[in-house]
Image (cartoon, coloured by chain):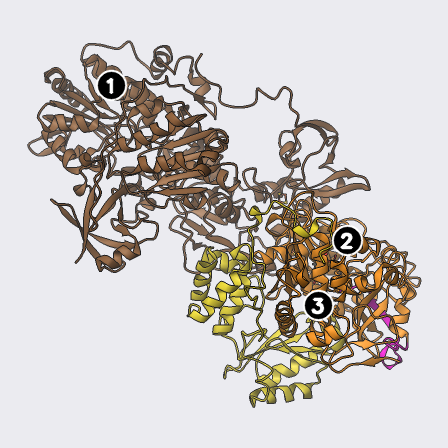
């Protein structure tokens, strides 16, 4: 009853924009503003095309989609991809002249095409191949020498370009410019020599480069991780959802011989519009990694040694049974499915575990979900979007694409409240820059400036709220969000916590109880109060901002049980390690940041002996003497829909649909917000901003060979004038210290950083900045000295 | 390999200032770079990208579209012999053969001394004066092979430097809009009203 | 009766009405001093002393036809801007590159102030608040003359803020290209002016008058079109329409090149002057060189289908030339006498358009080059029968259906009227096919004479014993 159906389809009853036209004599219903080709796509009459893409501006340049439209002076030839439908329009796609043109166009396109289909990745799924077959002349009369270019040249670490195959449809170049905002590949030269190129020796360094490979209608762009790996007809494929981050882009997972070979984006209208970021697209490599955990490991005097599941689970049960009451804690769960989280929450209830948190002190309190909720579409159609969030381009790339697109098309105005320039800064209507910790002042400025007040009164306001700085406490942001929500009318919040299923995990029972969050749990552990720490796909030593706290917490736990796909910094300290099935190896559902539940599918058998997290939970429950009444995944799903508020009425069959189903979260009781008294930093100090980049040392990235090298590495970024003041040069090493600890990092000048602040990317190869973070003060101030 | 000089940067900024959108100045700034170096260097493209706020790739895409921009050094004098219909009818092919022989290079080549680059050009809007050519975009009309020889001799002897600047410079006169006389640019999005003189009254 | 001026190479004056070339007789015609002394900026003064709308109305009733190629009336074009959308811009098309065309450069080099005055009148009449004057990149002298003239005009208060002390203010910004014929197409011109590759946009939706420079309403006018305005303002609509015909009033500048006795640029009376007058008239070209016979001529720039002697008596009037299978285009006639190697002549044009393709449309990018390759093989004497058929096949992929051509009594051909259907965005693609089609239609035997004939050799099977 409280589930909301996600999208249109139903409400087209009386539509003032409805149009009736005919295509090849058949009546077609269309909407004003639509192109003819889009209307034709709902009929049997396929119009061939190469440059048209429904998610990009039409350019009408390949000329393949010409059709005849009845006009006052007889039939007119028009491109269907750029001619709007009209009431009573008579379109013909099947006349002799149209067929002649279609054949002629294919012949011309093939004239300079190398026809190397047998060795081309695209062969078998190639629009040029397919349409040459369906609409081509069947033979080529071109006897001249073809164009020649250097065979595939890498235009980035991920993408290769073979210009001989290119048919100059402008899809990749348009995508780079129009969708990604990274116009780093363009047409160069002219006429018959036109080609797609980057600036000489400058890579196509875009977080979205893989999309160009997917939309290329020939094999001109190929992806390094997939090249020569398979023929499309050998691939098995299933629709699923990417769980790399919480945007939850729809994908197709393609596999062959029980190995995942490729992800492709699927066009989900409310979510990703077909796009994926490169991290999400290519990190399937980690699933295939030889470093995956194969069997359970149990600690002996000789360290962690492989054991059978039977022994490892018995051992686990022994540890759980012997723990003092109230001394078991669970960290993590945001990386699994809804079903995993629910099953573990049941086990936790069974064992009376109060200490649980799906986050690792690096997000915002779960109360953020209690505000009136906004969807991605809401944000992209609001009058005003207020960003109180990390750099979305780095953390939730496809959400960045959506918002960037909406701002570029002048559909929304963005007010950014941030400590440094983000990917969206250049598209923001106003950027309010503030020192870390001063969100409150910045928000006050926004709320009290007449111009902004006027803007905020223009209609819906969506606050995009997330943890933008790991070097300061989360409650500063919460207080700022709260100030906006309590002041502005027509406001809603889009929470942008980043881990794949963080919203699902928090909603299904792994949210902290009574403010005992990850930090409190680690503190308790450090104080000897935790007998058994369960790390459910969690790596506190890598992810908890306060490194010292994480270390003390891990050291203080009597026993550690880790459920994970890889051994990581934390799980090497575990007493028992249970190998978990990875994404692509299990079925289930996931919940994205807006509360949209969609399904994930099993495409391949789990690696070695690994099992889904939910199965491990059920087996442990059974061994502990309680079978939870559950045998299968379906049992869990039934129980979720029956018992979990917000998920009621949800059935897997709807979640399996492309656009999934939105859950609702009950409103929270008023949040206890507090704002630290922020002490002014002294003039010799820098206030620290620590945030994530898209590529870091996270396992899925680090274990994907094509992505690992893209992480920028550790460093500290300060304003050029500050760097000068410190006496350092761009690239030279500096000492960054607080009153206790110091680290040495390469320094970089960046005008994206405000004077007086220092930006350090999180979790990068090299020195760990977390040594300096103690957010107990609310913010972190450091000194930087040239060495 | 050079960025624009300070003087050229100042000029570039003046030019950019005449357009509602900086990117509009792109082609003119590329001309400025070519005037400075004789061809378009990689560094100049990077610099221009910074000046107008686009990526280097965009500058490269625009620059390579246009025939006049060279990406490698060319001769001090670029000789463009027109070969389109009117000139062809009046003997431009013969003229080209003669030029190739005289300079010892094929069309598209540059003499080893770096003095001449010879190019086949398309219609130069001097069709009644065929066959014609341009040296660094200065015309010569109704040429016979003997005229061509004389022209090359003059160029080699530096007798035409007053008229023909080295390759890269096109116009020797620049527009300057004195600030007190200029209207100045207005961003299109900030204009919502018709211009004042459309008020139905005579302006004078 | 005819005279040519050494300082205006190619221009031949005559005893005819002079609307745009009246100052060409002066060596210093491009200076502000000469300009003002000969009635310069009087047209502007006349315009500014009346409400803008009435100036616009005058341009409409004078039917000032566009001189850039399409011949669309300027006054009507100015009125096509959408209601209430501001600002609007003027873009002056001085990119003159159409093969055979030579007139705008003369106007810019010889009388830049007249053009500036024309721009100002247009801006005033149509409410255009900034003007961009785009000159072809290779025209160094024209750029210098216009730059100098603009500097003078700014200093004298003719351009800029509060022109002549009125509330009319407009900047004219000099811009120039860098070598690309297609940029003369108005939407490509706008792309180029925005700093992009000069690739034409699709019309619709990108009709400049509605959606042009920076997405704003933009009027694109040719240099000669605008150069007409000062005279019109000074002398009035009646004086203007008393020259020429009702549908084609005023004069036109026409360049006649090729095999005539006196090739040159003439300002002719619109609508009544015939091709015969132009090619054979004493005050014009004075006949074909060496008294040779006329073989063919291109009547309106390289993009125009060819005429032969059968069409000589057509007047310089758009609809009649259209019905006869060609167009007036940019006012450029290229004349071929009996000695002309027709396939080779056609190749020079096809090569031009293939080379100048922007690369956007498949048929133009691939088809243009393909045509050029086949044709050059034929010209080299290496073509085959199949090649001739293939020329037409490729051409039909660019322009499907009937293609316009002239009538020819000797060949028993009747004319197919202009225009044609096309699969491309702009006319560059079709233009690569135009010369091929005209030449093959009117002079097929010249092609057939050059191709390699393969004759079947009759052989008898011989038994081979082992
Ligand atoms: C390929 C192509 C090239 C053109 N080149 C020119 C040109 O060089 N100069 C010009 O004035 N118009 C040229 N035109 C015509 C312009 O698109 C446009 O119609 C003209 O500038 C409008 O001015 P008008 O109305 O004053 O004639 C060209 C058109 C095409 C399709
Ligand atoms: S017809 Fe040719 S020149 Fe014109 S837009 Fe198409 S490709 Fe470009
Ligand atoms: S799909 Fe319409 S022109 Fe390419």
Q: Nearer the viewer, residue A597 or B170?
A: B170
Q: Main secondary structure of the magenta part?
A: loop
Q: Is residue B190 magenta?
A: no
Any part of residue C270 in sight: yes
| Residue A330 screen position, x and y as percent | 20, 23
Q: Nearer the viewer, mark 1 or mark 2?
A: 2
Cα separation, mark 2 vs mark 3, equals 58 Å
Q: Tell me the quadrant of the picture where the N terminus of chain B can be found.
A: bottom left
Q: Chain A appears what colour?
A: brown
Which of discs 2 and 3 lies nearer the camera? The answer is 2
**Total number of numbered discs in the rendering:** 3
For ligand 3, which image quadrant applies?
Answer: top right
Q: What stretch is highlighted in magenta?
A: C282-301
Is C450 or C394 nearer to us in this picture?
Answer: C394
Mark 2 neighbour density, 10 Å: few (under 14) some (14–19) many (20 or more): many
Chain hosting mark 1: A
What residue sits 25% from the left and 35% below the top?
A292
Task: Tell me the distance, in whole angstroms, between the alpha carbons under discs 3 and 1.
Answer: 81 Å
Examine the image and state in which quarter residue A666 appears: top left
Which mark, by number, is residue A617? Answer: 1
Supply the letter of whichever chain is orange: C
Q: Residue C382 carries which label?
A: 3
Give the secondary structure at mark 2: helix
């Amino acid at each position: 009853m409280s589930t909301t159906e996600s999208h249109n389809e139903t409400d087209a009853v009386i539509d003032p924009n409805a149009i009736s036209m005919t295509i090849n004599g058949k009546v077609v219903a269309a909407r004003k503003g639509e192109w003819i080709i889009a209307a034709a796509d709902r009929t049997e009459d396929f119009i061939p095309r190469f440059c048209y893409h429904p998610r990009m501006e039409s350019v009408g340049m390949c000329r393949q989609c010409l059709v005849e439209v009845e006009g006052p002076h007889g039939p007119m030839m028009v491109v269907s991809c750029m001619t709007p439908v009209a009431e009573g329009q008579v379109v013909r796609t099947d006349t002799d002249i149209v067929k002649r043109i279609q054949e002629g166009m294919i012949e011309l396109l093939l004239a300079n095409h190398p026809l190397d289909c047998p060795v081309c990745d695209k062969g078998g799924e190639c629009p040029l191949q397919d349409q040459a077959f369906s609409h081509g002349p069947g033979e080529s009369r071109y006897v001249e020498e073809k164009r020649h270019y250097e065979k595939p040249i890498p235009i980035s670490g991920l993408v290769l370009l073979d210009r001989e195959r290119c048919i100059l449809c402008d899809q990749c170049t348009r995508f780079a410019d129009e969708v990604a905002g990274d116009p780093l590949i363009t047409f160069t030269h002219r006429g018959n020599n036109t080609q797609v190129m980057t600036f000489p020796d400058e890579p196509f360094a875009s977080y979205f480069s893989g999309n160009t490979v997917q939309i290329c209608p020939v094999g001109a762009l190929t992806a390094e991780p997939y090249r020569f790996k398979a023929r499309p007809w050998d691939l098995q494929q299933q629709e699923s959802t990417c769980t790399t981050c919480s945007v939850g882009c729809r994908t197709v997972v393609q596999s062959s011989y029980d190995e995942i070979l490729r992800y492709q984006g699927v066009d989900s209208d409310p979510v990703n519009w077909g796009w994926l970021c490169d991290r999400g697209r290519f990190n399937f490599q980690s699933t295939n990694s030889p470093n995956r955990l194969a069997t359970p490991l149990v600690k002996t005097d000789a360290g962690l040694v492989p054991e059978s599941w039977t022994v490892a689970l018995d051992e686990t049960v022994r540890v759980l049974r012997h723990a003092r009451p109230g001394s078991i804690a669970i960290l993590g769960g945001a990386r699994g499915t809804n079903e995993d989280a629910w099953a573990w929450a049941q086990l936790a209830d069974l064992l009376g575990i109060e200490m649980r948190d799906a986050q690792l002190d690096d997000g915002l309190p779960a109360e953020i979900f209690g505000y009136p909720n906004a969807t991605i579409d809401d944000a992209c159609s609001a009058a005003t979007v207020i960003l109180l969030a990390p750099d979305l381009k780095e953390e939730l790339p496809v959400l960045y694409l959506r918002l960037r697109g909406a701002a570029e098309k002048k559909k929304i105005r963005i007010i950014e409240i941030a400590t440094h320039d983000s990917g969206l800064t250049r598209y923001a209507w106003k950027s309010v820059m503030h020192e870390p910790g001063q969100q409150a002042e910045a928000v006050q400025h926004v709320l009290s400036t007449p111009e902004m007040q006027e803007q905020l009164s223009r209609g819906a306001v969506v606050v995009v709220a997330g943890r933008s700085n790991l070097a300061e406490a989360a409650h500063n942001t919460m207080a700022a969000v709260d100030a906006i929500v309590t002041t502005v009318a027509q406001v809603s919040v889009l929470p942008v916590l980043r881990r794949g299923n963080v919203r699902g995990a928090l909603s299904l029972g792994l949210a902290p109880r009574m403010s005992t969050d990850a930090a409190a749990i680690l503190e308790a552990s450090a104080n000897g109060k935790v007998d058994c720490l369960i790390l459910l796909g969690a790596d506190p030593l890598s992810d908890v901002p306060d490194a010292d706290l994480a270390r003390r917490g891990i050291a203080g736990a009597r026993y550690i049980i880790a459920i994970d796909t890889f051994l990581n910094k934390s799980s090497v300290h575990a007493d028992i390690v249970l190998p978990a099935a990875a994404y692509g190896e299990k079925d289930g559902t996931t919940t994205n940041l807006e509360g949209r539940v969609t399904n994930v599918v099993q495409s391949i058998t789990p690696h070695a002996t690994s099992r889904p997290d939910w199965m491990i939970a059920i087996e442990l429950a059974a061994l502990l003497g309680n079978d939870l009444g559950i045998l299968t995944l379906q049992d869990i799903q039934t129980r979720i829909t029956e018992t979990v508020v917000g998920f009621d009425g949800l059935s897997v069959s709807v979640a399996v649909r492309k656009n999934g189903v939105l859950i609702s979260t009950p409103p929270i009781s008023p949040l206890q917000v507090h704002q630290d008294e922020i002490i002014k930093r002294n003039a010799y100090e820098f206030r620290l901003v620590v945030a994530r980049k898209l590529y870091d040392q996270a396992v899925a990235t680090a274990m994907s060979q094509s992505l690992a090298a893209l992480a920028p590495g550790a460093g500290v970024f300060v304003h050029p004038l500050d760097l000068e003041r410190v006496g350092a040069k761009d690239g030279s090493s500096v000492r960054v210290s607080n009153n206790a600890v110091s680290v040495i990092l390469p320094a970089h000048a960046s005008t994206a950083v405000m004077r007086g602040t220092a930006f350090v990317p999180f979790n990068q190869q090299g020195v760990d900045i977390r040594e300096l973070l103690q957010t107990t003060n609310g913010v972190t101030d450091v000194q930087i000295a040239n060495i | 390999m050079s960025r624009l000089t300070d003087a050229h940067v100042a000029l570039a900024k003046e030019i950019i200032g005449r357009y509602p959108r900086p990117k509009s100045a792109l082609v003119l700034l590329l001309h400025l770079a070519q005037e400075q170096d004789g061809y378009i260097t990689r560094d100049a493209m990077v610099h221009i990208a910074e000046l107008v706020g686009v990526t280097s790739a965009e500058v490269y895409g625009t620059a390579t579209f246009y025939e006049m921009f060279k990406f490698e050094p060319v001769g001090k004098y670029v000789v463009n012999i027109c070969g389109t219909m009117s000139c062809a009818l009046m003997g431009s092919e013969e003229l080209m053969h003669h030029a190739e022989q005289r300079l010892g290079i094929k069309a598209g080549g540059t003499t080893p001394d770096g003095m001449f680059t010879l190019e086949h050009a398309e219609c130069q809007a001097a069709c009644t004066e065929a066959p014609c050519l341009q040296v660094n975009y200065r015309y010569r009309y109704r040429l016979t092979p003997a005229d061509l020889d004389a022209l090359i001799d003059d160029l080699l002897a530096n007798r035409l430097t007053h008229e023909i600047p080295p390759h890269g410079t096109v116009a020797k006169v620049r527009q300057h809009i004195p600030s007190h006389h200029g209207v100045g640019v207005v961003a299109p999005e900030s204009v919502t009203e018709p211009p004042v003189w459309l008020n139905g009254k005579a302006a004078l | 009766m005819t005279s040519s001026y050494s300082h205006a190479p190619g221009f031949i004056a005559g005893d005819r009405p002079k609307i745009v070339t009246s100052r060409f007789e002066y060596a210093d015609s491009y200076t502000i001093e000469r300009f003002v002394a000969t009635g310069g900026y009087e047209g502007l003064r006349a315009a500014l002393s009346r409400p803008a709308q009435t100036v616009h109305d005058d341009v409409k009733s004078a039917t000032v036809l566009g001189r850039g190629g399409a011949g669309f009336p300027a006054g009507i074009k100015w009125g096509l801007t959408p209601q209430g959308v501001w600002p609007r811009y003027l873009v002056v098309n001085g990119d003159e590159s159409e093969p055979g065309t030579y007139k705008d450069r003369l106007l810019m080099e010889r009388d830049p102030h007249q053009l500036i005055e024309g721009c100002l009148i247009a801006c005033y009449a149509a409410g255009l608040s900034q003007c961009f004057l785009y000159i072809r990149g290779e025209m160094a002298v024209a750029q210098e003359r216009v730059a100098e003239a603009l500097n003078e005009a700014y200093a004298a208060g003719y351009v800029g803020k509060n022109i002549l002390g009125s509330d009319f203010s407009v900047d004219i910004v000099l811009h120039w290209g860098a070598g690309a014929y297609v940029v003369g197409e108005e939407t490509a011109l706008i792309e180029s002016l925005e700093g992009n590759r000069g690739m034409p946009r699709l019309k619709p939706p990108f009709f400049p008058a509605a959606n042009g420079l920076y997405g704003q309403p933009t009027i694109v006018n040719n240099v000669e079109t605008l150069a007409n305005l000062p005279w019109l303002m000074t002398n009035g609509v009646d004086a203007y329409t008393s020259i020429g015909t009702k549908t084609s009033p005023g004069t036109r500048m026409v360049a006649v090149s090729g095999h005539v006795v006196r090739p040159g640029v003439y300002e002719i009376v619109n609508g009544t002057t015939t091709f015969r007058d132009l090619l054979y008239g004493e005050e014009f070209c004075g006949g074909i060189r060496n008294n040779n016979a006329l073989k063919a001529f291109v009547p309106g720039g390289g993009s125009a289908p060819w005429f032969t002697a059968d069409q000589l008596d057509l007047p310089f009037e758009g609809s009649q030339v259209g019905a006869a299978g060609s167009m007036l285009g940019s006012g450029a006639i290229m004349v071929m006498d009996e000695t002309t190697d027709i396939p080779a002549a056609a190749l020079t044009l096809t090569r031009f358009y293939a080379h100048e393709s922007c690369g956007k449309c498949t048929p133009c990018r691939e088809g243009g080059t393909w045509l050029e390759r086949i044709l050059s093989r034929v010209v080299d004497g290496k073509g085959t029968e199949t090649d001739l058929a293939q020329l037409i096949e490729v051409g039909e992929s660019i322009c499907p259906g009937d293609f316009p051509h002239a009538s020819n009594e000797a060949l028993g051909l009747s004319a197919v009227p202009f225009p044609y259907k096309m699969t491309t965005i702009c006319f560059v693609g079709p233009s690569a096919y135009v010369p091929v089609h005209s030449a093959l239609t009117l002079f097929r035997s010249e092609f057939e004479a050059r191709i390699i004939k393969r004759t079947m050799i009759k052989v008898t099977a011989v038994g081979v014993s082992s």
